[in-house]
Image: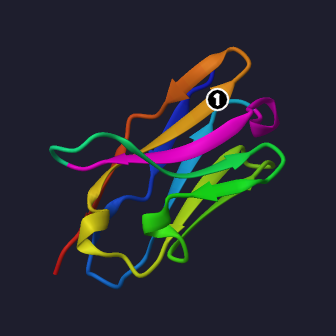
Amino acid sequence: QVQLVESGGGLVQPGGSLRLSCAASRSIFRINVMAWYRQAPGKQRELVASITSGGRTNYADSVKGRLTISGDSAKNTVYLQMNSLKSEDTAVYYCYADTPMGSYWGQGTQVTVSS
């Protein structure tokens, strides 16, 4: 089983930056894919960015060029660097891991972009 703990959310002004972290309880080399999803009020959860164990990344069109996903295998942690934030980025952000034993979710961290 994999436990995921997110951190780094908060309130930021439009145009600002935040970095989210997701710490996994086991080596991320044992994980096929890690990803960040988000869910805004009244909307469905959507994929923001993903990274494979081989380092291949994928992004939603709405965040390309502004958000960057990366992994640190030594710390079993995946990051989401968020720059040039917009009000429409406001949501609860969830970490996700796909492993040979199943799929796991973190508890979520709130990101609010507002002046």
Question: Which stretch appears magenta?
Answer: 27-40
Position of 9 relative to 73 (above/below): below
**Rendering quarter of residue 114:** bottom left
The spot of residue 51 in percent (x, y) is: 68, 49
Residue at 76%, 54% (x, y): give it: 56
What is the quadrant of the N terminus in the image? top right
Residue holding disc 1: 98
Residue at position x 72%, y 30% in the image = 26
Q: Position of residue 86 (x, y in %)?
A: 30, 75
In the image, what residue type sits under mark 1? Asp
Is 56 or 77 nearer to us in this picture?
Answer: 56
Question: Is residue 33 rendered magenta in the image?
Answer: yes
Compared across the picture, whether 59 is left or right of 82 comes to: right
* Protein image colouring: rainbow
Q: Is 36 on the left-hand or right-hand side of 73?
A: left
Task: Quarter of the image for the C terminus: give it.
Answer: bottom left
Left or right relative to 31: residue 20: left
Front-lying residue, 99 or 20? 99
**Residue at 63 percent of width and 36 percent of height:** 24
Q: Nearer the viewer, residue 59 or 30?
A: 59
